[in-house]
Amino acid sequence: MANEKKYNEIQWLDRNESQYGPSPKCFEYLKKVTLDELGWYSRDFSRGVKSSLSEKIAKDFNIDERQIILSYGSEDLLKQIIHYYLDRKEKILIPKEAWWYYKKVAYEVGGFNVEYPMYKTEENGVATFAYDVDKMIEIYDRERPRIVLIASPNNPTGNRISKEDLKRFLDACRGALVMIDEAYWGFGSKENDYVKPFIDEFPNLVICRTFSKYFALAGCRIGYAFAGKNLEELINYSVRYLGYNRLSEKLGEIAMNDEEYYERVTKLMQEDKDYFYKEFSKLDGFTAYKSYANFMLVDMPKDIRKDLNKFLKERNLLIKFLDEEAFKTETRITLGTREQNYYLMESIKEFLGKK
Ligand SMILES: Cc1ncc(COP(=O)(O)O)c(C=O)c1O
């Protein structure tokens, strides 16, 4: 099977997008979109809320609707928060092993990054990255940054921070604005019980989420955040009086209501992650890291990277060969459908057999 080229088009397993797509109910809705949904602004603002989506999120989480921020994807939240709060020469504390994008935003406003490292360990026999809270607190105390950023699950390492560690860290840095990027929420667990207590207890906390990953609606660009009580200015700054994208909001609501579909997809992905851990552990020089997201970080021998990339591209398989300061030998694989995942694994094995 792996001998032949299976796909005629590029399989994009390099951008952490969903290969299964959103709930089929989203497509049903789009077929029935009405004139006013396309042609008119929403009337939600006159009801005293941002939108029916923020209203739903507020109700689900038992949080005041005013404390829900809506945005154009969570990229937009990241920019709004940093642009609003970070002054020239101020510092933002970010993970060293993180999404490259964090590293550039501070410079847009004349601020700069201070990095905290993660460490490598093992969880139930699988290699994993981990947050080092003691070290983070030590660096926070020394550097006194204006903003602190934590990503959970983190891209590209795939690990998350526990509620207990997070609380300990939040307690230690009450003087900063703390942003938790939860773009990959949902794949490892659907835990939500900490959101309200943390938002109530930590007034400078903002928890950012998106519909792009778990809900597979990246093209619709919908992000949202829970903002602590001190962040009134950010909330006011981000409000759009003419409303948001009505179609996207509706699609978000439909997706949130179709729990059954997303749980089915997540279960398949979890089984495929277990398959990858097992298969990569059989290959010399490869390490697959524990992932709570829709991608997996895989370390591999440096000398095969170029040829493997070429080999996979010839089969229309695109995975991300990272080449940045923190990652020189790692590859990030976006989980595909079962068929894509198996074909990728077979292709890697075939390449190694050929060498
Ligand atoms: C860690 C992380 N945060 C945020 C985003 C932004 O996603 P979006 O703007 O689609 O919500 C991404 C996108 O890949 C990401 O990897």
Image: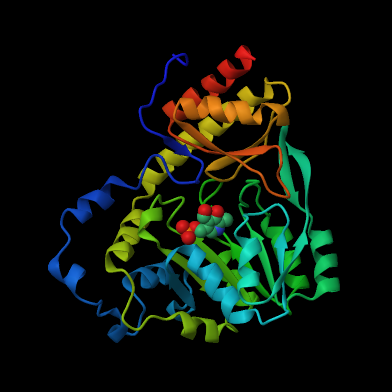
Total marks placed: 0
Q: Is residue 259 above or below residue 50?
A: above
* Closer to the camera in the image, 65 or 14: 14
Residue 205 at x, y percent in the picture = 62, 73
Q: Is residue 346 left or right of residue 304?
A: left
Determine the residue positioned at 72% across, 78% down.
Answer: 90
Q: Is residue 313 left or right of residue 132?
A: left
Q: Is residue 173 left or right of residue 198?
A: right
Residue 248 at x, y percent in the picture = 32, 62
Q: Quadrant of the C terminus?
A: top right
Q: Is residue 349 above or below residue 100?
A: above
* Closer to the camera in the image, 67 or 18: 18
Query: Toward which corner of the image does residue 304 lie, by quadrant?
Result: top right
Residue 109 at x, y percent in the picture = 62, 77
Residue 116 at x, y percent in the picture = 77, 60
Q: Is residue 274 above or below residue 186?
A: above
Outermost residue, left direction? 35
Query: Toward which corner of the image does residue 5 lie, by quadrant?
Result: top left
Residue 313 seen in this snapshot? yes
* Closer to the camera in the image, 2 or 28: 2
Q: Quadrant of the N terminus?
A: top left
Residue 124 seen in this snapshot? no
Determine the residue positioned at 18% across, 72% down.
Answer: 39
* Closer to the camera in the image, 338 or 263: 338
User: By what rule are the colours in the image chosen?
Assistant: rainbow
Determine the residue positioned at 47% across, 26% down.
Answer: 314
